[in-house]
Image (spheres, rainbow, N blue to C red):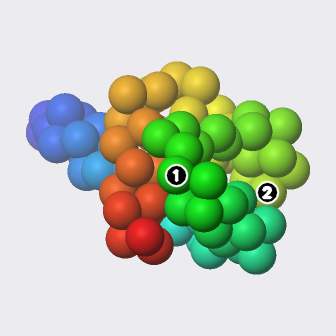
Amino acid sequence: MQIDTTNNQVETQALHKEAMKIRAAEFMSKDSQKKSIQSLITKNNQRFDVNLDDLRQFSPDLAKYVAKNPIEAINMFESQLDRII
């Protein structure tokens, strides 16, 4: 009997990505992040910085995901920022 490990890996990766999206949403919902976003809007800035050390304190798994998948992470945080604004 042969088990299709490729499908299992894809499903596991998809579940992990969804979990990281949820963690990113939780991080962006923190009061400190909301204050940073409000400041960004008030000053009409175009850049929102996510401090990796703050992210590590909040969720080591999310920080690792960001380091390994920076493009996907940027998209996750941009989506959250768009939702909040």
Q: Is residue 37 visible?
A: no
The residue nearer to you, when weighing 84 against 10, is 84
Q: Quadrant of residue 30?
A: bottom right
Residue at the spot 73% in from the left edge and 68% down from the top edge: 35
In the rendered view, tell whether residue 7 sits above or below residue 18.
above
Q: Quadrant of the N terminus?
A: top left
Q: In the figure, is residue 40 to the left or right of 14? A: right
**Residue occupied by mark 1:** 44
Disc 2 residue type (three-letter)? Phe
The residue nearer to you, when weighing 21 against 12, is 21
Q: In the figure, is residue 49 to the left or right of 35? A: left
Residue 41 coordinates in the image, percent (x, y): 54, 61
Q: Are marks 1 and 2 in contact (CB under 8 Å)?
A: no
Q: Which mark is residue 7?
A: none
Q: Residues within 10 Å of mark 2 (few under 14, many from 20)?
A: some
Q: Is residue 68 visible?
A: yes
Q: Which mark is residue 58?
A: 2
Residue 38 coordinates in the image, percent (x, y): 63, 68
- Name the element at disc 1: loop
